[in-house]
Amino acid sequence: MQELLRRMHEWMSAYMKSFYTDDEEVQRGILIKEKHTGYVTSNCVELAKFLNLSNHDVELAEIIGLFHDVGRFYQYQKYKTFNDAQSEDHAELAFKVIEGLEFFNELSVDDYELVKFAIKNHNKKVIEPCDDDRKIFFAKLIRDADKLDIYRVLLPYLKQKNADKMPNFITGRSPDISPDFVEKFVRGEQTDYNSIRTNGDRKIVRLMWIYDVNFKWTMEKIVQRGYIDKIVENLPMNEKIAEGVRRLRGYVEQVINGK
């Protein structure tokens, strides 16, 4: 499969660069996603190797990481936003690209279906029910690899003074947190990304992602890189949010300690 992977990387590199433009706003978004694609692909490979997967499955993880956001480039070029609710679901856009690529036919039927399932579910609130454990496993793997890098991407925009410099990722610029987001944070519940209204909401969503991390390896990376602390430092703190933070830190400690 190494030869196939080489061709896939070459195609993806050329595809991403085909969206380069003199429009500064669009170009900034394209470059962010190009870099993100590289990091997520590396995360997938590193996590797969940490989990002692077979060479074949490491290669499948690499393919999933490489193509998971292939729909983002057309999305940002057309809509100038990465907000699916304001444009189109970028996983569905990815399918339109993938289904037109002949080299995917070189995968076995099972592998192709697994790759599509993982990509389809990488951006959803929850993974859709499935009786195929391998599909579920790889969906969890890409979700972890993706989240880990999104923490990096959004780090410069945590401070409100930098939020206005962010490409059109969010639906609101207010630093406040919507009351329903606070309540769900205290309970440790996920929320619908499409209901994000403020920059504060987006920060809370990033923290609630912690409860959806699937592998200890990912959690350790998140902690080592200080992502949780940096988000918390930039929250408009009150008693309820502090309660949610305490609950979150307790959960992280349990995961890392293997409980």
Image (tube, grey):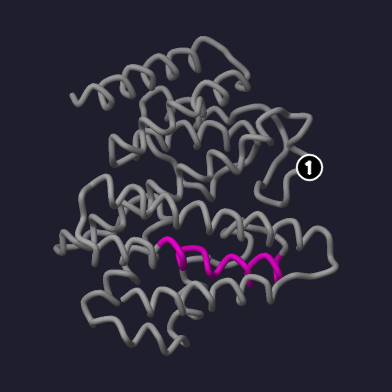
Please name the predominant secondary structure of the magenta segment in the image: helix
Query: Please, what secondary structure does the residue beneath circle 1 have?
Result: loop
Residue 251, x across and y down, in percent: 31, 23
Residue matched to label 1? 165
Residue stretch in magenta: 65-79
| Residue in the foreground of this view, choosing between 65 and 166 | 65
The residue most toward the top is 239
Occupied quadrant, residue 110: bottom left
Q: Is residue 109 magenta?
A: no
Q: Is residue 258 left or right of residue 21?
A: left
**Camera-side residue: 190 or 12?**
12
Instruction: Please tell me which residue is depicted at 36% across the width and 38% down the height of the picture.
Output: 218
Please state the total of marks drawn on the protein image. 1
For image coordinates 29% across by 42% down, the residue present is: 214
Between residue 229 and residue 199, name the one nearer to us: 229
In the rendered view, would you say 91 is above or below 6?
above
In the rendered view, would you say 145 is above or below 103?
A: above
**Most foreground residue, 254 or 126:** 254
